[in-house]
Image (cartoon, coloured by chain):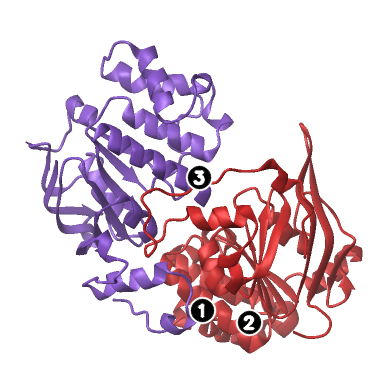
Chain colours: A purple, B red
Amino acid sequence: MIEIENLTVVFGDSDNRVTAVDGVSLKVAAGESFGLVGESGSGKSTILRAVAGLADSTGSIVINGQKQGRKRDRNFYSQVQMVFQDPFGSLHPKHTIDRILTEPLVVHDVPDREAKVRAVLDQVQLGPSFRFRYPHQLSGGQRQRIAIARALILRPKIILLDEPTSALDVSIQAEVLNLLDDIRNELGVTYLMVSHDLGVVAHMCRRFAVMRQGKVVEVADSRHLGTGTLEHAYSRQLLVASKGYDRAVIDAFADL
Amino acid sequence: MTDTPVLEVRNLNVRFDTPKGEFHAVKDVNFTMGREKLAIVGESGSGKTQTGRAILGLTQGHITADKMAFHGTNLLDLAPAQWREIRGKRIAMVMQDPKYSLNPVMTIGDQLIEAGKRLLGTDGAHKRALEMLEAVKIRDPKRVFNAWPHELSGGMGQRAMIAMMLMAEPELLIADEPTSALDVTVRLQVLAILDDLVKTRDMGLVFISHDLNLVRTFADRVLIMYGGRVVEELPAKDLMNATHPYTRGLLACAPEVDRPTKRLATLTRDPAWAQSPGGTR
């Protein structure tokens, strides 16, 4: 469904060039939920932005059998949608929920808009009463449901999830992750999900890539995390760190 | 623990006047702490930050309490001049995000010197600033001393913040989500610095966090707040045996790598949690 070959993204000009993504190759099957995990600056979000056509890249990106060029067409965006990290910044503050959800339908000239808005609100477990509210009248978790609804309303085949729950409280995170799970089981969409939280990625994704300084250091299977069979020392360090504070192991942390 | 507690708080309340009426952010909070790592945990809006800020009188809300004593001194009766002898000197605070809490137009060194100048004089503060940057495990203290905040990574900035708070050798450090903006390995390294400081300097630490898993492994004792109240208080090592349904619910709904579940537990909130009287049991 998603095939990335030798993807490289470079920011800046000659003097201060930053290679944010450095020759990454990945394959994600249809209906799979694939994770990208790493610390800040590892290039995980930049991969998502490159797939979405929001960052210039070299290498090849093939979505659903179609090689993507520099510009994405409208058809691409009906197949690929994105959910961003910050539910406070990603919804237009002066548009009602109804207008936010209708906009993709207008852009893609989809008929029967009201019914679709009602249906998608139902799907993200918010009632029709939310249609005429504004984002500021919603909690963080409700806003993120709206962002998911907006991504979902065009019935895309792929949803790119950029830290979808890192701005939320842990109890709200559980609800949103369960919702994302339900949607994938019901509709068979493919997820490419970025998170800094190994626990979240292990829960949501069978396979995930550990990233560091623009490179994939390892593609691992989350079922193996419990037994600790990670190959790369950096991934093992991330795993140890995700289990909480242990004074004894911290001095052993290296800038691997 | 020494005989007189470092901090004793009895029936702390913080209220805000809003156009929609009074908002009661902190309700009847009680705790006593010695030279230990006390964690205050809760979700957003639970009142944990307001509790931390109230100790230093740094809130817009109205603070009332039967008692809020720091080494026996009642903080509620202090005049502004007396507050200045305590704030930043004997009780210091580290905020969440170094990007917003450091002065962007002053070098790190100047900011550290400013924090220690009144106590140590400019030369003394200069020397101590370099020592403190070293104490927080910054590899090249001179470079960081001369750097501007925007030139530092998040982890470095947070270490510089902690170094600044230590300039006056406080007896109590209030750290409000000091590591939430940091990457996980850097987070643990910064926590190790705080941990070592508590041990070597005999300091008390109020550690405000939303991360139960982190607190369980880092703190000595934990207060769990919900809706402005302390709903449970227990030693960190007993957190897995917590009895309050809110604490248990919070522990259950976090995904963990070595406890895989098909579906995450969700929290059903009981309005009674915010009603029942809180405090020490």
Three-letter code for the amino acid on which mark 2 is drawn: Val
Q: Characterize the local packing of mark 1: few (<14), some (14-19) or many (20 or more) Cα atoms within 10 angstroms.
A: many
Q: Nearer the viewer, mark 2 or mark 3?
A: 3
Q: Mark 2 belongs to which subunit?
A: B
Label 3: state its secondary structure: helix
* Residue shown at 32% from the left, 10% from the top: A112
Examine the rendered structure and indicate whether residue A123 appears above or below residue A217.
above
Q: Nearer the viewer, mark 3 or mark 1?
A: 3
Q: Characterize the local packing of mark 3: few (<14), some (14-19) or many (20 or more) Cα atoms within 10 angstroms.
A: many
Q: Give coordinates of residue A244: x percent, y percent.
A: 46, 70
Return the residue nearer the eye: B35 or A72.
Answer: B35
Instruction: Give the image quarter of residue A17.
Output: bottom left
Instruction: Give the image quarter of residue A75.
Output: top left
* Residue shown at 55% from the left, 73% from the top: B218
* Residue shown at 82% from the left, 70% from the top: B8
Label 2: state its secondary structure: helix
Instruction: Write down the residue under mark 1.
Output: B192
Q: Mark 1 belongs to which subunit?
A: B
Label 1: state its secondary structure: helix
Q: Give coordinates of residue B153: x percent, y percent.
A: 43, 66
Instruction: Write down the residue under mark 2.
Output: B198
Alpha carbon separation for disc pair 2 and 3: 33 Å
Q: Mark 3 belongs to which subunit?
A: A
